[in-house]
Amino acid sequence: MAEADILSHIETALPGTIQEQHSSHGNDTIVIDRGDLPTVLSQLKEHPDFAFNLLLDITGVDFFGKEPRFEVVYHLHSLTHNHRLRVKVRLTEESAELPSAASVWKSADWLEREVWDMFGITFTDHPDLRRILMYEEFRGHPLRKDYPVNKRQPLVEERDPITNPWHKG
Amino acid sequence: MAEAAAPLLRAQKDVAEHDPTSEIMELQMGPSHPATHGTIKFNLTLDGEKILNCAVEIGYLHRGFEKMCEQRTWNHCIPYTDRLNYASPLINNVAFALTAEQLLDVEVPERCQYIRVIMSEISRITDHLTCLGMAATEAGAISVGFYLMESRETLYDLVTAVTGARLTVSYARVGGVTHDLPHDFAERVRAAFADMRRILSDCDKLLSKNRIFIDRMSGVGAISTEDAISYSLTGPLLRATGIPYDVRKAQPYSGYDRYEFDIPTGTQGDNYDRFSVRFEEIRQSMRIIEQALNGIPSGPIRIDDPQITLPEKKQVYGNIEGLMNHFKLVIEGVKIPPGEAFLSVEGANGELGFYLVSDGSGRPYRVRVRPPCFFGMAALGEMLRGCLISDIITTFGMVNMIGGECDR
């Protein structure tokens, strides 16, 4: 299938789910509602015309100060048809949660853990939602724009080696 | 007499009922373990030496790459990308620059594309040599490790001649590269490759019919094609299962469609296939470099646009316009129009993608990198189920986790 008509083809295959669509810099994008996410993702994977079997990436973007504040971005690739698609879900700060895709792709497990760790976006029915890159005791979500870049949360008190050397005398 | 013997008998009975060899053992391996690079922890559930479950913990090398990039101008991010996969930094540089150029809707001059391909492929070879050399060393074939490191050093000499550094190259820029190739580069590459072909054939003979090596690698750490796709594995890990997916062929960038090369694949998806795929990829990369050196045109190595690339030093020191241009670009950064782009290149370990969001200022609004070995680590537990403890070392070596990239 030619790349140009993926968007219109999705529109006919999944009527009423696409809120917005555009194509920029060679990337086709659809924006959907989080309620439709499980059906749309599994359809995109299973439908033989799309066959997006490779989940390339899940990530978040924090548009701090705008509404809705968060975007969760899925990048899909089809090994069968060699085409790509970007799927976006927009979330407000008050209800930053959406359904998990871990039952569709196994790699979604760790990717969603990272989005939760970095942005504090909850994935409901995720099998094991806990921090992945930061440590358990860490407070806050570092990639949010309101998390100060210079904030430190050391687990062991920081020591100045000049004034407080390791060995005394 | 009977009372005195009783405790001893009870102890013997305890031992008999409580057979330690039947016990399920929990073992934590790493992060301070020489084979885990100090950055990975395996929580193992063991039945004797057999692995029932392996839960992988990452994040020990997290340094906030994505947050740091948001504080800097676009070109300031290039040195950070060096530190992602430090075994193939040139590929990271090129991937970041290409994505930014996609946002700008510009294409670099042809000579620059050739240079980027040559340098990326040299980086791919150094990465594979590191991976294979270390994996062979860990499996006991230490002389192969030394031979491959020797070969890698000749390539690092080439990289140093072009960029001035072995690992922290910072060679690409948005809109071009920093330097042109040295005038004797083609001859030096050919000399290095002649040397390398000899070393590779030596190592091939040392390993491919070596009983110990085959026993350690073959059938170990295998993953099915279906699982490999579901775990989003790419690169040598996916190709070892038989899928000929390579971003250079599937979604060509930097003019990769000009070159003739094959995509080696495996059949079993085990460590031996991963090893063979990487070994063959080195030869294919050499093919690409030789074609590129034969076809490289002369011309500029960066875009001639004062909004994107720095002016010549003669202009900077010679007139006020050049000086202002230089100052504005360095302090404020390249102004990239608002938008978003995702572009991926074939990294040494798999698909390396950058997702960049710009708000129109000189700094990226969001930088996301898709690290290929992150997915390999997610699938490692699946690969290791049913294997032995000693198989962790070879499988982990073949996933080729690079901490800087996995944890960012």
Image (cartoon, coloured by chain):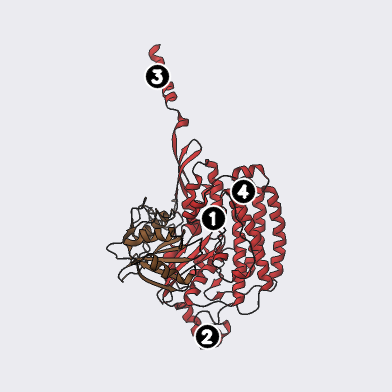
Q: Alpha-carbon neighbours of circle 1 within 10 Å: few (<14), some, or many (≥20)?
A: many
In front: label 2 or label 1:
1
Q: Amino acid at mark 2?
A: Gly
Same chain? Circles 4 and 1: yes
- Image label count: 4
Q: Alpha-carbon neighbours of circle 2 within 10 Å: few (<14), some, or many (≥20)?
A: some
Task: Identify the subunit bearing mark 1.
Answer: B
Same chain? Circles 1 and 3: yes
Residue beneath label 1, please?
A: B238
Residue beneath label 3, please?
A: B7
Residue beneath label 4, please?
A: B137
Give the mark, 4 or 1, whose residue is nearer the N terminus.
4
Q: For the N terminus of chain B, give its image quadrant.
A: top left
For the residues labelled 4 and 3, the Cα–Cα distance comes to: 51 Å
**Rendering coords of residue A83 (x, y %):** 49, 66
Q: Which mark is residue B322?
A: 2
The residue at the point 69 percent across, 74 percent down is B183
Q: Which mark is residue B124?
A: none
Q: Alpha-carbon neighbours of circle 3 within 10 Å: few (<14), some, or many (≥20)?
A: few
Same chain? Circles 4 and 2: yes
For the residues labelled 2 and 1, the Cα–Cα distance comes to: 49 Å
Quarter assignment of residue B220: top right
Task: Identify the subunit bearing mark 2.
Answer: B
Give the mark, 4 or 3, whose residue is nearer the N terminus.
3
> Contact (CB < 8 A) between labels 4 and 3?
no
Task: Identify the subunit bearing mark 4.
Answer: B
Q: Amino acid at mark 4?
A: Thr
Please state if B252 lies on the left or on the right of B230 as rendered.
Answer: right
Q: Is residue B71 visible?
A: no
Q: Colour of chain B?
A: red
Q: Amino acid at mark 1?
A: Leu
